[in-house]
Image (cartoon, rainbow, N blue to C red):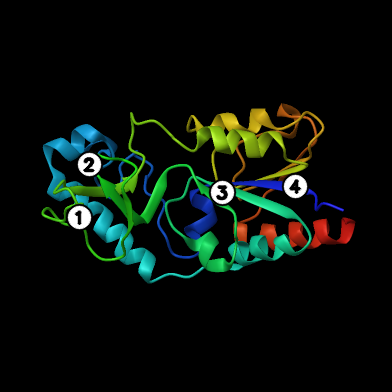
Amino acid sequence: MPKPKIAILTGAGMSAESGLKTFRDENGLWEGHDVMEVASPQGFARNPELVLEFYNQRRRQLLDVAPNKGHLALAELEQGFDVSIVTQNVDNLHEQAGSSHVVHLHGELFKVRSTVNENHVLDWKKDLVLGDLDDNGHQLRPHIVWFGEMVPMLETAAEITQQAEVLIIVGTSMQVYPAASLIHYAPKQTPIYFIDPKPNIRSADFDNLTIIPKTASTGIPELVSQLNRNT
């Protein structure tokens, strides 16, 4: 008998308790930078050193953190369910925790790609600097989806959500498109669980919506225990 399918959408709040800062502060700045300076093709063309160093700092930070109880609980969920995680996060904490099917909507910090051939992707954990080239002599860049760029995994994420028998949303405002549109792909009868300490969604907004106003490391283990009891 096939395992029930669970789709999980995660955002910055998922990794905050591991010590990873959410990029954007209250003023919309990323570590003191306007987002277009460090997360757009135009910003990279204007000042590639600044952009590369911005992501070098994020990469160094990621080397110093570990999955939290929320990540570990989602990995544990695979014992009884067919679990697919769609994350807006560019860290690899889901994979570190043991989750086996993770789709990264916005790219991955531990990967870089050619500035000319976007399909030429390399694993990369050290600093990336000007002069780091692909096999054809083209500069490498962070494997990150910048503002104004296509989100190549969006169709895959939509298909995962369409097949969900349970949908869990953790640590995301559901305000940033196109990722925010994914909730609308869930089948009408699918139960939806929204885990966030400051939820900005109402139960009346969707059928079968349960709001769990807790952090990822508290709310996810509780929900996983509940789902395991119900199977």
* Residue 25: quadrant of the picture: top left
Q: Is mark 4 on a helix, strand or loop?
A: strand
Q: What element carries label 3?
A: loop
Closer to the chain start, of discs 2 and 3, is 2
Q: Nearer the viewer, mark 2 or mark 4?
A: 2
Q: Residues within 10 Å of mark 3 (few under 14, many from 20)?
A: many
Q: Which residue appears at 16% of the width and 53% of the height?
A: 133
Query: Residue 171: which disc?
Result: 3
Instruction: Name the residue beneath numbered marker 1.
Output: 53
Residue type at mark 2: give it. Thr
> Position of 87 compared to 206: left or right?
left
Give how far across and how far down residue 205 sits, in percent: 71, 28
The foreground one among 66 and 79 is 79
Q: What element carries label 2?
A: loop
> Position of 89 compared to 25: left or right?
right
Instruction: Check contact, mark 2 vs mark 4: CB within 8 A.
Output: no
Instruction: Name the residue beneath numbered marker 2.
Output: 115
Give how far across and how far down residue 48 sits, in percent: 15, 45
Instruction: Name the residue beneath numbered marker 4.
Output: 5
Q: How crowded is mark 1: few (under 14 residues within 10 Å), some or many (20 or more)?
A: some
The foreground one among 151 and 25 is 151
Give how far apart the Cα atoms at labels 2 and 3 are: 31 Å
Give how far apart the Cα atoms at labels 4 and 3 are: 21 Å
Closer to the chain start, of discs 4 and 3, is 4
Residue type at mark 1: give it. Glu
Q: Can residue 97 be seen in this view?
A: yes
Give how far apart the Cα atoms at labels 1 and 2 are: 16 Å
Q: Which of marks 4 and 3 is in front?
A: 4
Q: Which of marks 1 and 3 is in front?
A: 1
Closer to the chain start, of discs 1 and 3, is 1
